[in-house]
Image: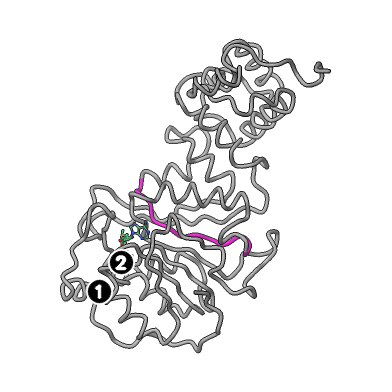
Amino acid sequence: QGMSKPKPITRLPPLPSTKELLRLYNVRATKALSQNFLLDPKLTNKFVSKAGNIRDAYVCEVGPGPGNITRSILNHCPQHVIVIEKDTRFMPALSLLQDASKGRMSVVFGDVLNFEMGMLFPKECKKSWDDECPPIHLVGNLPFSISLPLIIKWLKAISERSSVWKYGRAKMTLTFQEEVAIRMTVPAGHEERCRLSLMCQNWCEVEHKFTIPGSAFYPKPRVNVGVVTLTPRISPLVPLNFPIVEKVLRHLFNTKNKMCKNPLKKLFPLSKREELTAKLMTVADVDPTITPVNLTMEELHRLTMAYDCILEQYPSLRSYDNRDKKNNEATGLFDEIPPPISLQK
Ligand code: SAM
């Protein structure tokens, strides 16, 4: 269901409001799908304008619901909009909007977490990675229940330049619970700094654009909502593959307020723990007593590089996972690890 043919630019004709449509089709918000609707057109327009200039661009919206944000997108005159929605109860409202859009909108019913997005856009949109961003925008008032797994999945795809990011550094403008939006953007030293902050900031520039009060949604969630734009970086700050950066961060933030050498020890099997942790901190030239929240991206870079060097020396450590006792015993890593490669015959 590609979207290739350029269409003339038109604004939408008058339509019943999405509030009226929800009433007409008797659609009530479902908690299991984290449905909180943003029905005020002023706010949906503000949300869309924060995505940047989408005129003539290709937009993919996650979770359109009855299509309230979709209407604002269409009124910003994009080339084409594709929406991905899990709940088929929105079929009539989205079909109505699709007809009104005069061919500028496609609707996909499915789960965005399993949806292959690598073929959605025409080839002409493609830009090379170190060029400007392609005219492709991902937007969505994301359901709270999937916002975290989705952003982690997308960061991984960005790191691999796969999925949508085959087309270049496509931007995302998405909603998160305000506290999550804050965590995504805070710098080193901030008490909210966590694994997610460093993951997001490693692969993207992250901007917290504005806050939508919970009271603007129907039904009203218990929290406020933050609108965040993520722009993939040309070069990640830690230029290593996703699993290794993720593994180091997962260990580091296992216990947030301890000196970072303590959680990092668990990267290594017991028998080599003290020796290799000391080596890691010395090679990385990072103060072993620093707490993870104070760690800068530069220090994370040095730590991950040093860990990667240790893995080069002891390849069997790649599969070491301190939580997986069975696997460690099976691979002989629980007690002993083989000597470094340089000493092996
Ligand atoms: N865009 C509408 C708005 O702003 O009022 C609805 C937003 S509501 C917070 C989230 C939407 O995402 C709902 O329509 C819900 O059905 C949909 N949704 C939930 N899980 C989904 C998934 N895994 N894939 C696609 N859509 C999903």
Asked whether residue 169 is drawn in magenta, I would say: yes
Q: Position of residue 48 (x, y in %)?
A: 42, 68
* Magenta-colored span: 167-178
Q: Is mark 1 within 8 Å of ligand 1?
A: yes
Q: Residue at x 20, y 58 (%)?
A: 219
Q: Residues within 10 Å of mark 1 (few under 14, many from 20)?
A: many
Q: Amino acid at mark 1?
A: Thr
Q: Count the marks.
A: 2
Lateral position of residue 22 relative to residue 204, left or right? left
Q: Which residue is mark 1?
A: 18
Q: Amino acid at mark 2?
A: Gly
Q: Can you name the residue that lies furthest to the right here?
A: 345
Q: Which residue is mark 2?
A: 65
Report, in whole angstroms, how far the alpha carbon at label 2 lies from the one at label 1: 9 Å
Q: Is mark 2 within 8 Å of ligand 1?
A: yes
Q: Position of residue 24 (x, y in %)?
A: 16, 76
Q: Residue at x 54, y 79 (%)?
A: 56
Q: Please tell me in which quadrant of the rendered image residue 287 appears.
A: top right
Q: Position of residue 229 (x, y in %)?
A: 48, 57
Q: Position of residue 160 (x, y in %)?
A: 62, 51
Q: Secondary structure at mark 2?
A: loop
Q: Can you name the residue that lies furthest to the front here?
A: 330
The answer to whether 188 is drawn above or below residue 181 in the figure is: above
Please say which color scheme the image uses. one colour
